[in-house]
Image (cartoon, coloured by chain):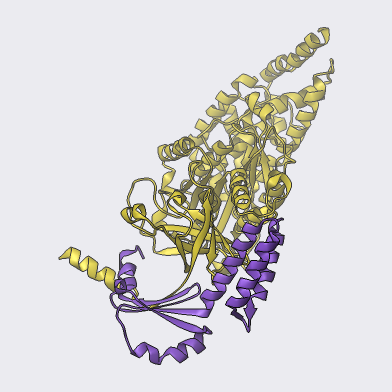
Amino acid sequence: MKGKKIKGLAKIMYKKSLKDEIVNLASVSVILKEIVSQKPHGLKNILKNYKHLIEAKIASEELIVETAQKTKDIEKMEKELLSKTGARRIKYKIAPKLIFGLKITHGDFVYDATLDSKLKQLTTDN
Amino acid sequence: MSILEDIQKQIDRTKLSPTAKNVGKITEVGDGVARVSGLSDVSSSEIISFSPSGPEAHQTGGNNIKGLALNLEEDAVGVIIFGDWTRLKEGDSVETTGNILEIPVGDTLIGRVIDALGRPIDGKGAINAKDSYPAEKIAPGVVFRESVNTPLQAGLKAIDSMIPIGRGQRELIIGDRGLGKTAICVDTIINQKGQNVICIYVAIGQKTSKIAKVVDTLNKYRAMDHTIVVSASAADSATMQYVAPYAGCAIGEYFMDQGKDALVIYDDLSKHAWAYRQISLLLGRPSGREAYPGDIFYLHSRLLERAAKMAKEYGGGSLTALPIIETQAGDLSAYIPTNVISITDGQIYLETDLFNAGIRPAVNPGLSVSRVGGAAQTKMMKKVAGSLRLDLAQYRELATFAQFGSDLDEATQKRLERGKRIVEVLKQPQYKPMDASSQVVILWAVNNGYLDNVPVEEISSTEEKILTLLATNKKLKDHLDKNKEMDDFAEKELERMMKTVGVRIEKPATTESTEGQTKTLKKSRQGKSVSSVVARKPKSITRKRTKR
């Protein structure tokens, strides 16, 4: 099977595994079982493409908020953050490496207001 | 104290606002090209910053590898990498910078050798350029331009007389390898001394030794004082070779915008096309004729379109482009040569046969043209060069026939003799560019038949004699330099000068018969015998040939 067909098939699988524009884990497992049982040509590549699409979708649904210490204030802004970014849920992480401040990751966008990044900015050429 | 101040300054300068970045991950990397997932917000030809991971990267100081986003696909981005791609791995993080490719420009660059990104490589320390120009820029529109009207003297008789180049023109130099394409350009650069032209020599895919030689020559003739060398040698990545001409052009545009005149030499664009072909094939773009991508024409047309002569109200600066194309076995109809010929305002075609016959510069006057340069030629040059091309063309035609024919009439023989002398006069040694007035004087002499009596072997020495005499005749030289016109005074003075040198006209020239010439004819009697000896020569040659 050629690249284009593989990509097309992965896309169809991806669309079928969405429910209300959210990745539905139940349908994902059904689709996976079906495709593995059928064993089409280039299965590995199809699965690779499919994984890539699902991962990107999940990343866009999720908001990762990283702070150096546990803070309560951030949870107040939860609603606003979700409505502004269009994400479905928020994951909190504690990373002492950031020293101070906050870092929000949404899909492939990163909003960084930590002391760590500021120090890094100082060390680069610009 | 000073170190502390320095640090303080640097801290003050840095913007420490929260950053919004668009990040991605490398999915594939190799051969100077990477495919990156993520980066949904990247724009075409945006600079991408790579952060190599692992202990090695930590040691070497982290993320100073940059790339250029070229292919924006549905779920991936194709990036070409400047620098050491071997340090990058699959899974390394990548982020956008929000900047497009910019080249530092400014007067501080003059006399320096830089790489395609504007970094100095001549070991003379940092360049403090205040400005930067985008590498890719849309060429100035019709409103901003005016037609070419000022000559750019190459300093070579063959070029300035028959294929004149104007400031703001694009003149292609085309020929096989080793025919002196670079030599013409180097001579042109040397000749720009004191002409208020900033020269930018862009070496693309050249041997580093050759680039070093060019820089050395320019230094030797003190031409680096008005020259910038942009070097992307064969050892540099295809990415650098691809960017180099745009960088050179951006630097030239800076000077043009300052109202100055700039000359950019792209040496050479066939290697640029190869570099772009490599990049395109690695990025997986569909290939067309000779495996070049579909936009190979636009690659060169958008570069050469940026050469312009700006209108006075927009500064009046100019950017002249001299692209070089290397042909394979003289094949002008290959893909890249035809493309660039159609883009440029003319071409200087160098030929192997001429080169081997000792005619250097080996310019073929039949196939070389300048479509707009004529308008920029000075009046005096126009006057002397007008008949030159025709005479030479006729000579070429006759010379081929004369090889077969046995007896030739006198008129034909005259033409052949004149042609031989024109060819001899148009020869010029390397690194010896000539100013316009000297060129005009020599061409005037040969055109008016003053050199017809001089044996071909003695032409160069006679030429030298005339030039030394011209150097002493300040009145005439200043007159020619100032008025740039061949008027009665100049002609009379020249006639007098020719007498001093000892050259005389045997007969009035067929093209231009003036009273002055007929007078000198009457006076000259010795010339006849010499010319008849010279004229007999071809006969004897042809007889020998027919016997065989």
Assign the C terminus of chain A to one quadrant of the image.
bottom left
B376 displayed left or right of A71 = right
Q: Position of residue B251 (x, y in %)?
A: 49, 57
Write down which chain is painted purple.
A
- Colour yellow belongs to chain: B
- Asked if B2 appears above or below B200 in the picture, the reply is below
Towards the viewer: B302 or B309 = B302
Would you place residue A19 above or below residue B455 in this image?
below
Query: Horizontal and vertical percent for residue A114?
Result: 33, 76
Name which residue lies at 39% across and 92% down. Answer: A76
Q: Could you say which is closer to the camera, residue B125 or residue B533?
A: B125
Q: Report which quarter residue B173 is drawn in.
A: top right
Regarding residue B85, the answer to whether it shows in the image is yes
Residue B370 visible from this viewpoint: no
Nearer to us in this view, B437 or B470: B437
Q: Please provide percent x and percent y for residue B398.
A: 80, 26
